Image (tube, rainbow, N blue to C red):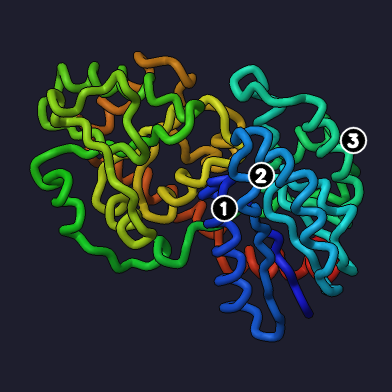
């Protein structure tokens, strides 16, 4: 079976899509030996670099990409990994065309994204040209059906698993010491790389907790917002870019993941936390409740009081942390890597699970 993944322009700067593609390639090669996987990445000519970024990327996405794939040969399966490229279905040469829709964030948060609704509608109208749609949660599946009138039997939900590294029991126990002493301090990790991760709320929660506990450290994945001056607050630490092994080391050496996100299509950091055995206090939005079910600790996304209360209970009684980790062990099989890639291959072969 010949499979071709259609990647993004590098200028898209969509790190999550790069990681998703790499994970598919590595996983399929590991669990399925009798397949051939290739990738295609489009390129922007130097001539286009003189254009403003917005227009350069629109021309690249909607015109250049389609032109560049016309000479590609036929494959058994074409898999488009980013839903902003649904329009490629018209030009792709493949017996079966598959696309992954991670979320419909540009529609659901259109005011924040300031997206061109005409282009979004155009892209969504092309979804019907694919043989099958993969999505990452039932929550997103419901949105796809609502906004595209796609047939439910043409959409499969595959819970994206954590990386092989996170499933390994091995980790560097002293790596975290570069940033914080986890033996003397209570370590909370959080995220700020996109606005809906709701870092402002994380910051308010941390400030309330710091009044009670002086030994709390906040490790942040992503660039800290401009209103934070961590030169004066040494308990807030901006982590540099970390590879998967280092990411694993931080998760397995910390005490809590604080995740007050007010929008997710899925919430992969929470999956990674479950696999790593890192207790999570999260917002109560549907995708996260889908991930944790009855093992979750939830608050409304902007309820600082609730988050402070829940985390305080965990700090006071560390036996609760052990109970959460025990519950996570019962959830891990839902995010099993071998099962995921077996299901993915079944979709490639049959267009459905």
Compute the Cα span from label 2 to label 3. Answer: 17 Å
Residue indicated by mark 3? 149
Residue indicated by mark 1? 10
SS label for mark 1: helix
- Relative to 208, residue 71 above or below: below
SS label for mark 2: loop
- Relative to 248, residue 313 above or below: above
Q: Could you say where residue 255 lies in the image, as x and y percent from the top left? A: 26, 42
x 77%, y 60%: residue = 68
Asked where in the image residue 212 lies, by quadrant, the reply is top left
Say whether residue 62 is visible. Answer: yes
Q: Earlier in the sequence, mark 1 or mark 2?
A: 1
- Front one among 196 and 310: 196
> Would residue 264 appear left or right of 312 to someone viewing this image?
right
Residue mark closest to the camera, 1 vs 2: 1
Compute the Cα span from label 1 to label 2. Answer: 19 Å
Using a 10 Å C-alpha cutoff, classify the residue at mark 2 as few (fewer than 14 neighbours), some (14 to 19) or many (20 or more).
many
SS label for mark 3: loop
Q: Are marks 1 and 2 in contact (CB under 8 Å)?
A: no
Residue mark closest to the camera, 1 vs 3: 1
x 68%, y 58%: residue = 42
x 72%, y 51%: residue = 100
Using a 10 Å C-alpha cutoff, classify the residue at mark 1 as few (fewer than 14 neighbours), some (14 to 19) or many (20 or more).
few
Q: Earlier in the sequence, mark 2 or mark 3?
A: 2
> Would residue 317 appear left or right of 113 to someone viewing this image?
left
**Label drawn at residue 268:** none
- Relative to 194, residue 321 above or below: below
**Label drawn at residue 102:** 2
- Front one among 164 and 93: 93
Q: Could you say where residue 258 lies in the image, as x and y percent from the top left? A: 36, 33
């Amino acid at each position: 079976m010949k499979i071709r993944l259609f990647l993004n322009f590098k200028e898209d700067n969509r790190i999550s899509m790069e990681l998703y593609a790499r994970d598919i390639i590595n996983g399929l090669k590991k669990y399925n030996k009798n397949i051939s996987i290739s990738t295609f990445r489009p390129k922007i000519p130097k001539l286009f670099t003189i254009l403003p970024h917005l227009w350069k990327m629109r021309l690249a996405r909607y015109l250049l990409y389609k032109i560049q794939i016309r000479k590609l040969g036929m494959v058994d399966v074409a898999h488009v990994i980013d839903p902003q490229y649904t329009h490629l279905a018209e030009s792709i040469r493949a017996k079966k065309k598959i696309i992954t829709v991670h979320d419909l964030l540009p529609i659901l948060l259109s005011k924040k994204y300031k997206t061109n609704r005409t282009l979004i509608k155009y892209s969504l109208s092309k979804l019907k040209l694919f043989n099958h749609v993969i999505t990452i949660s039932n929550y997103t599946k419901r949105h796809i059906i609502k906004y595209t009138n796609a047939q439910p039997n043409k959409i499969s939900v595959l819970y994206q698993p954590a990386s092989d590294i996170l499933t390994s029991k091995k980790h560097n126990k002293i790596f975290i010491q570069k940033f914080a002493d986890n033996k003397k301090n209570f370590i909370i990790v959080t995220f700020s790389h996109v606005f809906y991760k709701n870092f402002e709320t994380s910051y308010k929660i941390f400030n309330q907790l710091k009044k009670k506990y002086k030994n709390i450290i906040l490790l942040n994945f992503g660039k800290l917002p401009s209103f934070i001056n961590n030169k004066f607050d040494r308990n807030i630490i901006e982590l540099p870019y970390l590879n998967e092994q280092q990411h694993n080391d931080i998760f397995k050496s910390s005490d809590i993941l604080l995740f007050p996100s007010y929008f997710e299509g899925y919430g992969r950091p929470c999956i990674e936390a479950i696999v790593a055995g890192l207790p999570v206090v999260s917002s109560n939005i549907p995708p996260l409740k889908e991930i944790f079910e009855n093992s979750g600790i939830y608050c409304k996304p902007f309820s600082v009081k609730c988050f402070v209360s829940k985390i305080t209970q965990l700090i006071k009684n560390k036996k609760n942390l052990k109970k959460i980790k025990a519950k996570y062990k019962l959830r891990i099989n839902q995010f099993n890597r071998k099962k995921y890639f077996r299901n993915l291959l079944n979709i490639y072969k049959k267009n459905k699970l």
